[in-house]
Amino acid sequence: MSTPSMKPVRSMLFVPGNRPEWIEKSITSKADALILDLEDSVPADLKVEARGIVRAKLAWLAQQGQRVFVRINRSPHLYDFEDIVAVVGPHVEGIVISKPCGPEDIDTVSMMLSEAEYRNGTALGATRVIPLLETARSLELAYEIAKRDRVAAICGCTAKNADVARALGYVWTPEGRESQYLKSRAVMAARAAGKLPIGGVWQQVRDLDGLRQSSLLDRNLGMSGELALHPTNVAVINEVYSPSKEEVAYYQGMIAALEQAQATGRAATIYDGEHIDIAHVKTAREIVALAESFNA
């Protein structure tokens, strides 16, 4: 069983699963994907109701062309199979799981997903998994987690005073120096496994300038997108993780310059004052293709 690679995603917006009006309104945020949350944002006594609300909204969201993931609950020992079997199907791209201890948790969830796919008539292996690396052990074993077949992306997120900070004992700062190492580990593990690295998460949701700076830091480290906690944050995140028109024009010019050089029998040339060759143009083509994918 092998899960196909995941389409690039810049923004993944959390939406509480017990708020149907918020779920409907969330599509106006223009987030690349929604994470309908059955876990932390849902009060304990509303979790069963939230599961039903989420299940009822999936087909409608699909009709709107909205990509959807669902964050499921976990007990102290196991992830919630009732959550899984309720949402697995053609309208859910994958599930998000919190606080895996290591790759064995991914294996357990994968088996549960296979059973749910069988019961619900969904192709085996169709449902992706995105783990939130929130324990010290999961961060240490990031590559072992990332290379599991169902895993499409891993999240190296560092919210202020949240699970990762508590697990590692660091003190959060807006500059993020204390978390650069663990985020770089997540990026390297994801890229080595051919998966997407997802960053974030900015919880001072009204501070859009701070969000922009935090997103730029994550983007510079190699993150391909990030989690969002509020619809007003999506536009900033999408902008940061999208190649600008100026960047696209620059890289298109680079491609043309090398093609012109190759036409005259050269393998390298000077472009905008810099030496370039095929390695640089491979990067340029990837960036141009990424921009086109977001504009499609």
Image (cartoon, grey):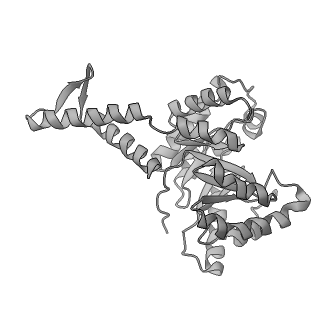
Q: In the shown orientation, is residue 244 left or right of residue 104?
A: left
Within the image, what quadrant is residue 209 found in?
top right
Q: Hey, which residue is sitting farthest left in the picture?
A: 264
Q: Residue at x 10, y 38 (%)?
A: 263
Q: Nearer the viewer, residue 52 or 223?
A: 52
Residue 180 higher or lower than 195, as above or below: above
Q: Residue at x 72, y 38 (%)?
A: 164
Residue 17 visible somewhere in the drawing: no
Q: Hey, which residue is sitting farthest right in the picture?
A: 45
Residue 50 visible somewhere in the drawing: yes
Q: Residue 10: x and y, percent? A: 55, 44
Within the image, what quadrant is residue 236 found in?
top right
Q: Residue 129: x and y, percent? A: 60, 58
Q: Residue 255: x and y, percent? A: 25, 37
Q: In the shown orientation, is residue 149 left or right of residue 29?
A: left
Q: Hey, which residue is sitting farthest top in the picture?
A: 273
Residue 164 higher or lower than 47, as above or below: above
Residue 258 higher or lower than 273, as above or below: below
Q: Residue at x 56, y 37 (%)?
A: 185
Q: Residue at x 78, y 66 (%)?
A: 53
Q: Nearer the viewer, residue 85 or 189?
A: 85
Count the marks: how many?
0
Q: In the shown orientation, is residue 188 left or right of residue 26?
A: left
Q: Residue 74: x and y, percent? A: 78, 58
